[in-house]
Amino acid sequence: MNKIDIRPFKAQDKASLRLLCCDVADRGGPIENFFPDRDVAGDMLTKYYTDYEPESTFVAVSDQRLAGYINGCMDNRRYGLVMFWLLMPAMLIKAFKRGLFFKPEIHQLLRGSLKNWRRIFVWRKSSFHSHQGHLHIGIAADFRGQQVGRKLINALVEHALVQGITELAASVHDANKEAADFFEKQGFVVRERYPMVLIRDGKEEHYHSLLYVKTIAIH
């Protein structure tokens, strides 16, 4: 088993974290399975955490290689405001300049988003208006099964305790059985469950979005 160190995120980790995030974004597979532009996806999935709240991100490193990461947010409301007012306008401009809106994969995503509007704008509204935290986690394929995820969760929980956060949430869709099993083993429980639609290759796939929550006991 490889020796793995867990440490806080550093600025020099940014490129490797973006790369790994896009490599595992689709149920452990690459982002290109459903989104055609890595650069825009990297901004969407990581920029808030690495640029606006880097102190809440931790990485797993083995022999100078990034084995995994956990992006944390200690204030969902702040995340929503930064994403909506600062990051999304810049991402839309970048996507337009790169011709992204002319690609069929984007049309599929937009159609899926329209079908999921209740989940995004109504059912999840309370989550984004709370001052609790959330996380995203990714592990490189050849480091899975080595307790990397558990160690990253523990590091973020310790950080959340210092910040006075009592809950951390993670969103998973129920087709991702591996991720659901992982969160349940780490003490997360399903608090909310919403129907959702994904469109791949022009075909609708129907799932449920599961909001997993871990309650943190403050000593």
Image (cartoon, grey):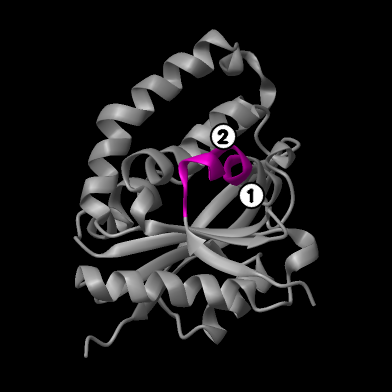
Q: Residue at x 50, y 63 (%)?
A: 7
Q: Is residue 143 above or below residue 198?
A: below
Mark 1 is surrounded, within 10 Å at the Cα level, by few (under 14), some (14 to 19) or many (20 or more) other residues, namely many
Q: To which quarter of the image does residue 74 belong? A: bottom left
Three-letter residue code for mark 2: Ala
Marker disc for residue 138: none
Q: Residue 25 got which mark?
A: 1
First-in-chain label (2 vs 1): 1
Check the picture and name the quadrant holding the N terminus: bottom right
**Splitting the image into 4 quarters, where does residue 135 fall?**
bottom left
- Direction from residue 213 to residue 46 in the image, left or right: right
Front one among 189 and 166: 166
| Whether label 2 touches label 1, CB < 8 Å | yes
For the residue pair 71 and 126, the one nearer the viewer reads as: 71
The percent position of residue 204, horizontal first and vertical second, equals 66, 46
At mark 2, the secondary structure is: helix
| Horizontal and vertical percent position of residue 194 | 44, 63
How far from the left and from the top, in percent, is residue 110? Answer: 52, 31
Identify the residue at horizontal 74%, vertical 41% (top origin).
33
Q: CA distance from mark 2 to mark 1?
A: 9 Å
**Residue 41: assigned label:** 2
Mark 2 neighbour class, 10 Å CA radius: few under 14, some 14 to 19, many 20 or more: many
The image quarter in which residue 111 lies: top right
Instruction: Give coordinates of residue 215: x percent, y percent.
Output: 32, 82
Q: Residue furthest front?
A: 63
**86 shown above or below 160:** above
Image point 56% across, 78% down: which residue?
A: 150
Locate residue 122 relative to residue 138 in the image: left or right.
left
Q: Amino acid at mark 1?
A: Ala
| Magenta segment | 9-18
Quadrant containing the C terminus in the rendered view = bottom left
Mark 1, secondary structure of its residue: loop
